[in-house]
């Protein structure tokens, strides 16, 4: 457990997607206790037993109920993993979308696929597809990594073994471009999921 004084904790209040979300849930799922200043000026401890209604409201992503001054959260070791980004030509977008159902298919599932995000970005006036990926695997180039690209060849590829600091620096470097977030919704037709 870690007692955190608030500094840059906004991700926790927006859910808290991380490289460990697949294994341990969102960051908000791992908060054990908050310290909150209410509108009345009272400072209260908020957890699953004390002020539980406020605890669940805060964990569900709302901070309109008071000022959170600190929280206690579960933490987990992460070590090295395979992560980075790939930039594909815009002409590859159809192939990437076509490969995505195989990428997320239960048959290809493993516990290492921690994070994947796509964005349509403009770099130097040219539209490209950016794929940010992280695999919690100490194995370079985990097999699932190749399923997504298929036959598409990235124009830029910085995937490699890294740690959390290196992965976050890679992601930060890619956010200097304008992005348009895209959502791809898929219908699972597997009878086992009905």
Image (tube, rainbow, N blue to C red):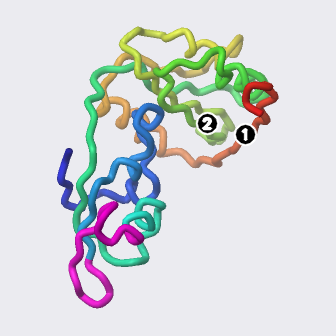
Q: Residue at 62% of width from left, 15% of height from top?
A: 108
- Does the stretch in magenta take in 71? no
Q: Residue at x 28, y 34 (%)?
A: 76
User: Residue 52 appears at what percent x and percent y?
Assistant: 37, 67
Farthest residue, direction bottom: 40
Q: In the rendered structure, does residue 42 fall within the stretch colored magenta?
A: yes
The image quadrant that residue 78 belongs to is top left
* 100 vs 187: above or below: above
Residue 166: where, in percent of width, then height?
A: 32, 29
Position of 70 relative to 98 (above/below) = below
Question: Which residue is at the far front?
Answer: 49
Residue 81 figure quarter: top left
The image quarter in which residue 97 lies:
top right
Q: Position of residue 56 (x, y in %)?
A: 43, 63
Q: Secondary structure at mark 1?
A: loop
Q: How many marks?
A: 2
Which of discs 2 and 1 lies nearer the camera? The answer is 1
Q: Nearer the viewer, residue 171 or 140?
A: 140
Point out the image quarter for the C terminus: top right
Say if mark 2 contacts mark 1, CB within 8 Å: yes
The residue depicted at 19 percent of the width and 60 percent of the height is: 5
Look at mark 2 in the image and give the residue it sits on: 118
Sequence order check, earlier mark of 2 and 1: 2
Mark 2–mark 1 Cα distance, whole angstroms, equals 10 Å
Residue range corresponding to the magenta coloring: 37-54
Relative to 142, is 41 on the left or the right?
A: left
Report which residue position mark 1 lands on.
184
Considering only vertical position in the picture, is 150 above or below 119?
above
């Amino acid at each position: 457990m870690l007692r955190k004084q608030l500094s840059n904790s906004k991700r926790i209040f927006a859910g808290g997607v991380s490289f460990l979300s697949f294994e341990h849930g969102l960051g908000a799922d791992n908060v054990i206790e908050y310290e909150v200043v209410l509108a009345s000026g009272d400072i209260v401890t908020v957890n699953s037993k004390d002020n539980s209604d406020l605890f669940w409201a805060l964990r569900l992503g709302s901070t309109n109920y008071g000022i959170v001054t600190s929280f206690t959260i579960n933490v987990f070791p992460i070590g090295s993993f395979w992560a980075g980004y790939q930039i594909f030509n815009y002409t590859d977008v159809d192939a990437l979308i076509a490969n995505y159902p195989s990428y997320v298919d239960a048959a290809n599932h493993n516990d290492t696929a921690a994070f994947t995000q796509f964005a349509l970005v403009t770099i130097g006036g040219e539209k490209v597809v950016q794929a940010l990926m992280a695999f919690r695997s100490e194995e370079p180039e985990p097999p699932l990594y190749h399923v997504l690209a298929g036959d598409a060849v990235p124009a830029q590829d910085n995937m490699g073994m890294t740690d959390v600091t290196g992965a976050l620096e890679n992601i930060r470097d890619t956010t200097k471009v304008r992005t348009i977030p895209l959502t791809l919704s898929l219908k699972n037709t597997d009878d086992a999921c009905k």
